[in-house]
Amino acid sequence: MRLSPAPALDPSLAGSLVLLHLAVFAAGLALLSSASASGLESVRCRLQGTPRPPAFSQDGDFVIGGVFSIHNYMHTVEHSYTSLPEPLQCTGSLDSRELRFSRAMVFAVEEINNSSDLLPGVTLGYQVHDSCTTVPMAMNVAFQLANGLDPMFDTGEQCSGSPTVTAIVGESGSTPTISMLRIIGPFGIPQVSHFSTCACLSDKKQYPTFFRTIPSDQFQAAALAHLIRHFGWTWIGAVRSDSDYGNYGMAAFLQAAQEEGICVEYSEAFSRTNPLSRVQRLADVIRSSTARVVVAFVSSWDMKILLREMERLPSQPRQWIGSESWVTDPDMLRFDLCAGAIGIGIQRSVIPGLRDFLLDLSPQKVSKSPTLTEFWEGAFGCRLGTGVGVEEKVCDGSEDIQQLQTPYTDTSQLRVTNMVYKAVYAIAHAIHSIVCEERENSTVNCDKNLNVKPTQVLERLRRVNFSRNGYQVNFDANGDPVATYELVNWQRRESGKMELVTVGLYDGSLPPDQRLDIDREITWVKNSTQVPVSVCSESCPPGTRKAVQKGKPVCCYDCIQCAEGEISNNTDSSDCLICPEEYWPNAERDRCVLKPVEFLSFHEVLGIILTACSVGGACLAIATATVFYRHRTSAIVRANNSELSFLLLFSLALCFLCSLTFIGQPSEWSCMLRHTAFGITFVLCISCVLGKTIVVLMAFRATLPASNVMKWFGPPQQRLTVVSFTFVQAMICTLWLVLSPPFPIKNLTTYKEKIILECDVGSAIGFWAVLGYIGLLSLLCFVLAFLARKLPDNFNEAKFITFSMLIFCAVWITFIPAYVSSPGKLTVAVEIFAIITSSFGLFFLLFVPKCFIILFRPEKNTKKHLMEKTSNDIRY
């Protein structure tokens, strides 16, 4: 659809002209009201100014008006205010496409007049006017269609006469259409436009008499936004005509584009009436922009001016996206700058007989119409009739319109032409429903003498519903048809000729994801088959998120890697997703994977080393017990309380082996076993050491005169001491297991990227009570051994016990901070290390010296040697 403000008239002046006309009209009404009140039954009225004859006209029983933008300028006359102004005249070049529209209306009327089904016996007439693509001329035509062509007429009530037309087809532009509706709307004259697409015209409160056979720009804007998003363009430029068509259309498009996530680098408006500097500035904005796609909601005339300026200083080719107004105009195909352009067009159609009608012109027929004469002379470069200049060629009748290649003769792309055709038929069907009735014998009788008022036609237009040439015609509550478009593409053929090719379809009545259907290959800018790229920022790959650049649209962003523990599995993600608790991002951070499970295993190096030490320690304890058993009758074994020694070796073997329960995947039973076995075996071990220490002290006391202490600490008492101390630990462990036992857990906090399988102690009180009890016995044993350190060492091992307890206590004191601070499976390793170290400390200090004497110094393993040493120590 095209929209054009008056080129030679300031918009404010045009508005003033409207107000002036309305003021004069209102004054006339006031005068008539006064006259009617005085008893006057008839008033003689005279039109202001000289009526302008229509471009084409024919009388009929019912007359349909037509308004088309055949010319593109209006001749401006300077008023002297001393004489009547001259009639308004159109100037500028003749638009042969608009001429085809007007002739299509004539063809439709004649086809209806020859029809036996629609309005039989009734003749339709027409008055087709040229609006010059300007608002003032469109307003003048509106007054003329409302008042008629007679300069003088009589009326009984008001100086408006009776409207000379029952309905109007047109105008081609939204702004002229709006101006006409302001004038003819109060008279109830319906207006059916073939090319006025402004969404504002759907407002029935403002324009109750308006209908159109072309979809609203609201649908076109949505279709363009859908098209742009389909090809992944998120960074575009936008230009529009500075008119109702361009401004309303672009506003609807920008809203739809925002909903589709499309950003606009610039949005500029211009008009062909603007100074050249304004157009040059717009061209410079396009050339310097980073957007490679330009959406143009522009009329054909405005687009031609812009493209001529763009061709003056060529720049990097742009992908043009066009609105229906210019992208389907055959006259625009001469601009190579727009090769590869795509846009929205009305569906192409076929109107049987129209081409023959358009070409049925001869010099004789043409000379009867000034408009056709101008077209003929311009097309063939000759002059018809007399008054030909010396250097001008005379049309001699050899001109062949069949060979003429102009938009007028081109019927291969009948799009808007079909909208004109349907508009005429819609009005004819509305009149038919008023004046015709079907009889019982299926014949139709029409009363051509019936006085049909425009308001009646208006009411019937709302209900028309018919099909013509396979195309359905009806209107919704807003006077709009169903939105169906073709996707058109400018493609260059091998011959070098630019052609308009239909490559797809857009149906606004379907669900959003099914509306666009592309069924042919598209040729893009530079005649490429590769879809051009137009983005402010490259897409962010999975694993990253978009961070909008400060002060720029949302389409301009930086790609930021997802934070630790987060992923994005889609391109251009706005946010990253947090992985579930037991999952962790992969290296690319585009998906969550199960965290690896970690525990101290028998198969890893650390586990193997600790296992070897544990088994080795147990083997040494067993080997030592074997040595002691084979030399159980020797002096050194008998002197060191063999019963407690064997029990101590047994407990040491258990201490070494209990560390194995800390290795491997934790389970409910292993968690309970490892801590209780550790606690009980160590208490058993310390109890034996404590018993040996007490025996040494008692034995020394027994050597003193009159001492009878050994009978109070004989073997039964020693066994009872060991059992009692061990029983206390067993009770503590039992209470711990009953009330709050240890259990396996998944540690998800120590390491974010992996899961640590470990044993929770359950009750911290129970855990530290077990360790505290071991520590208490160790401290008691250390104190007693320290007190016995100076006793004769041939009789006791007090010094070794002292050092072993010193090592034992040192190990477990340092264990506490190491245990608390060690992460993950190292906590278990620290605990195993403490068990093995303290066990080896006891073993080496208490048994290795004795084994050395038994095996390598047997001469010292005698009672004599031991007694001599003791006697010396006592005398000393």
Image: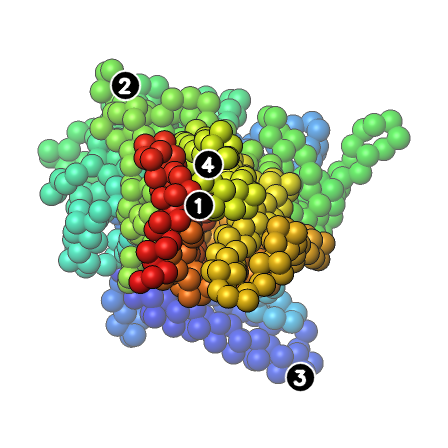
Disc 3 residue type?
A: Ser
| Quarter of the picture holding the N terminus | top left
Q: Secondary structure at mark 2?
A: loop
Q: Nearer the viewer, residue 26 or 793?
A: 793
Q: Quadrant of residue 6?
A: bottom left
Tag 2 near tag 4, CB within 8 Å:
no
- Against 92, residue 8 (above or below) is below
Which residue was labeled with disc 4?
634
- Judge depth for marks 4 and 3 and give the one in front: 4
Specify which label sits upstream in the sequence, 2 or 4.
2
Which residue was labeled with disc 3?
38
Which residue was labeled with disc 1?
839
Disc 4 residue type?
A: Ser
- Judge depth for marks 3 and 1 and give the one in front: 1
Q: Residue at x 24, y 39 (%)?
A: 318
x then y, percent, for residue 590: 41, 39
Specify which label sits upstream in the sequence, 3 or 1.
3
Numbered circle sitting on residue 654? none
Specify whether residue 363 is in view.
no
Numbered circle sitting on residue 493? 2
How many numbered marks does the figure carry?
4
- Judge depth for marks 1 and 2 and give the one in front: 1
- Judge depth for marks 2 and 3 and give the one in front: 2
Q: Nearer the viewer, residue 345 or 391?
A: 345
